[in-house]
Amino acid sequence: MSHYHQKSLAELSAMLQRREISSGELTEHFLARLRQYDKTLNSFITVVEDQAMAQAAAADAMLEKGAAGPLTGVPIAHKDIFCTQGIRTSCGSKMLDNFISPYDAAVVSKLKHAGAVMLGKTNMDEFAMGSSNETSYYGPVRNPWDIETVPGGSSGGSAAAVAARLAVAATGTDTGGSIRQPAALCGITGLKPTYGLVSRYGMVAFASSLDQGGPMAQSAEDCALMLNAMAGFDDRDSTSLDRAVPDSVAALDNPIEGLRIGLPAEYFDEGLDVDVRSKIQVALDQYRDMGAELVDIALPNASLSVPVYYVVAPAECSANLSRFDGVRYGYRCEQPKDLYDLYTRSRGEGFGAEVKRRIMVGTYALSAGYYDAYYLKAQQLRHLISDDFKAAFQKVDVIMGPASPGPAFKLGEKAEDPIAMYLSDIYTIAVNLAGLPGMSVPAGFVDNKPVGLQIIGNYFDESRLLNVAHKYQQQTDWHRQIPDAFS
Ligand code: GLN
C-alpha cells in the first residue's frame, strides 16, 4: 500500500503538479482509508465516493492542461456545518438529518473552485455546541491517539480525520474554540481567522457574532494554502470584511528574530495541567532560542470570558435556532395535532439536550427584565476583554499559551457536567469575544496525547501567525507524528 497519507498537503500538491500521482489515485487511497478506519473513529457523517472520484477526474484534466492551482486534486473534508449542494448538511443534529442543501456555502464553493476534492462531511457536536464531539446525533468521534478519549469539539470529526490521515485537510468552525481545541487534542494545526475574514454564508449559524470558519491541517504551511483559498470578501455575509487578503503562503518564511511574544499570566494559572505547562514551556524556550523575546503580560478580564460567552453565545443561538420550527425544512414530528403541537414536538424531538439547554439559557437572558442584567452586561464585559488584547498588542507581536487546559479526556468523563465541559475552552474563548485570529500548533505529547500551543495575533495578522508557526514546525516534527494505529 502506498504511503501518500504520510505526506503533507504541500508535498502532495507538488507531486500532483509534477504528475507523479493522479488525483484519482490519491482520492481512491483516502477513500480506501476511510472505509478501513472510520468504523473505529466515526469522524465522518457522510462520505461521497462517487462525487469525489468525479471531482478527482476533473482535477486530473486541469492538471493535465497545466491549469491547476495548489489545491487542485487534493482530497479534503468539510465540517458538516457547511452547506453542500445536493448533499446532506446535518450540523450533527437530528433536526437536519434529512436536510439536503440546495446551495453551497461560500467556503465550499471557494474550495471547489480551487480544485479541491471533497471526500465528505465530518462529524461534529450538534450545532457546534460542545467541546468533546459527544453531543452529535451521529454518535461520538474517537481520538485517533487513544480511542477511549474524545477528539475535542465541536470540529472533532475534522480534527480526528486529519490526525488519522483520512483526509489531507479539513474545514472547521470556531465560535469559542472549536477549531483550536480539537486541533490541540488531536495533534494537528488549526487556525481561527479574524472575525469577518472568511465568509459565513452557508455556514449554519450558531452565535453569529462569534462564528468563524477556518482551516485544519497537518501544518501551518498547509493551513496557509487552505486559507488563501477560503478567505475573502463576500457581499452575501453582512459581517464579511471588504479588504485585500494577504498571501499567507508568501509570508511563511519571514524571519522571526526579535518577535515579541506575550505570555499572559492568566493563561498559566492553577487550572493548567502541569505536564501541559511544561511542554508549552519547552516550546517557548525554543522560540527564545530562535531569537524571539518573551514578555510577561496581563489580560485581567480574561477570567470573565467563559461566563460572558455563556450569555452571548446562548442568546444568539436562541435567536438563530428559532428558524427550526418543523414547518420550512428539517425535522417534523409525526401527526401534529395543531400548530403549537407541531412547533413544540418538532423542536422537542429534533434537538438534543445541550442545544435545548442553550436555547433556554439564551431565551431567559434575552427576556424583558433580564436583558440589561445579563446580555447587556455581557456585551460591556466583552469590550473590556477586547481592550485587554488591544493594550497587550501595543507591547507584543503575538501572544502564546496553551490551547487547552489539559490533554484529551476520556469519553463520558465530562459529559454529565456542563460546567466542567465549558471550562475546556477557558483559553480559547476570549479570542472569539475579541474577534482576533488564533491558532493551535502541535507542541509535544503527554502520555502519548498531543499538546497544542496557542498563538494569538492582532486583527488580520493570520499571515504572521502562520509564519511564526511555520518557523517552529521547521525545527520540530510534532506535527508530522501519526498515531501508530493509523500510520
Ligand atoms: N465549546 C464551545 C461551545 O460549546 C465552543 C464551541 C464552538 O466553538 N463552536 O460553545
Image (cartoon, rainbow, N blue to C red):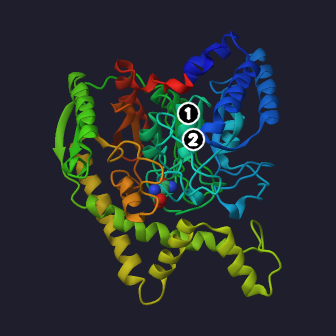
Asked if 73 appears above or below 393 in the picture, the reply is above
Is label 2 in contact with label 1 (beta carbons under 8 Å)? Answer: yes
Q: Which residue is found at the position 77% from the left and 67% from the top?
A: 329
For label 1, being within 8 Å of ligand 1 is answered: no
Counting from the top left corner in percent of width and height, residue 190 is at: 47, 38
For label 2, count other residues whose C-alpha is less than 10 Å away and answer few (under 14), some (14-19) or many (20+): many
Residue found at x 39% / y 47%: 459
Of residues 294 and 269, the one nearer the viewer is: 269
Which residue of the protein is positioned furthest toward the left in this rendering?
296
Is residue 147 positioned above or below 356 on the image? above
Callout 1 secondary element: helix
Question: Residue 166 vs residue 216: left or right?
Answer: right
The amino acid sitting under disc 1 is Val
Locate the C terminus by quadrant: top right
Classify 10 Å Cα crowding around label 1: few (below 14), some (14-19), many (20 and above).
many
Q: Is residue 471 left or right of residue 285?
A: right
Mark-to-mark CA distance, 2 and 1: 6 Å
Quick check: can you spot residue 231? Answer: no
Whether residue 218 appears in this view of the structure is: yes
Q: Residue 374: x, y in percent?
A: 38, 78
> In front: 337, or 385?
337
**Which of the labelled discs sits on residue 162, or is there none?**
1
Q: In the image as oriented, which residue stretches furthest toward the bottom?
A: 369
Q: Secondary structure at mark 2?
A: helix
Residue linked to disc 2: 158
* Amino acid found under the numbered disc labelled 2: Ser
